[in-house]
Amino acid sequence: MKKVIFALSMAGALLFGSASNTAVAQVEEGSMIVDLYYGFPNIGKSFWDAVAIDGEVNSTRATGLGPMGARFEYMVADNFGVGVDFNILTNGYEVDFTDTTSTFNSTTGMWETQTNTYTSDYNRMKLRVMARLHYHFVQTDMVDAYAAFGAGYKHSQNSFSTTDPDGVESELETGLNLIPVSLRVGLGTRLFFTDNIGVNLEIGLGGGPLMSAGLSLKF
């Protein structure tokens, strides 16, 4: 349903823009726009949700945040802008597990049972910073639609932590940053409700969320 709503919104924005191409453009040379956005899906979190278990000895919970980020664009011409995109994504899991041990008490001469519950946490983080180029092909007093290309830096990091005194905490980075390059192509639109405030919608491949939506501020 989210995909359908998003697609209809995009199509409506483009149709509205095409039908209103005589209106005054909302963005123009010298405009500065900040987009704050949250994207979906978080594929890693969805995977851990699918394999999570809830048992008497072990229970697993999926964790994750994003993809989310912020974009800044400066209009160097009426229909062309340059900017930067920063986004971050995390996913992983938490496992609670119970460990039961028996210890001989030499004072009482009896075996004593002790039960401890520990938590282990695995987390993967992906950070991207990219330069962006925007070509604006629909510009009206409400709608700003654009095609985008981005390229920049990508950093990934895995970490493991545990409250088990016999466990080993570590950062697992081997092979994650062999190609620290991020590329993205996208198609998006902004719908302005006032001269300075609107919402943004974008679909894209690489370097961020497949779909995103958020708040746009124009200065």
Image (spheres, helix red, strand yellow):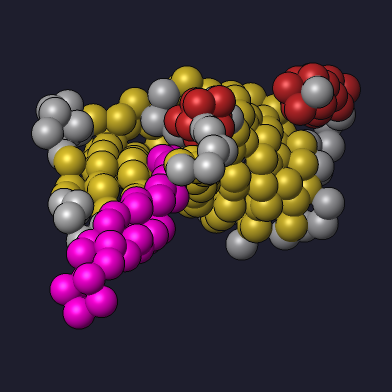
In the picture, which quadrant includes the C terminus? Answer: bottom right
Nearest the viewer among 138 and 163 is 163
At 41% across and 40% down in the image, what residue appears? Answer: 92
Farthest residue, direction bottom: 107
Nearest the viewer among 74 and 42 is 42
At 34% across and 53% down in the image, what residue appears? Answer: 100
Nearest the viewer among 101 and 126 is 101
At 46% across and 43% down in the image, what residue appears? Answer: 57
**Magenta part of the protein: which range?**
90-118
Residue 39 image point, x, y percent: 58, 38
Residue 116 image point, x, y percent: 37, 60
Farthest residue, direction front: 109
Magenta part, dominant SS: strand
In the image, taking residue 120 as reference, residue 63 lies left or right, namely: right
Q: Within the image, what quadrant is residue 210 found in?
A: top right
In the image, taking residue 23 as reference, residue 172 lies left or right, namely: left
Give the vertical position of 90 relative to 109 (above or below). Answer: above
Residue 164 image point, x, y percent: 26, 57
Nearest the viewer among 186 and 58 is 58
At 83% across and 51% down in the image, what residue appears? Answer: 193
Q: Within the image, what quadrant is residue 11 found in?
A: top right
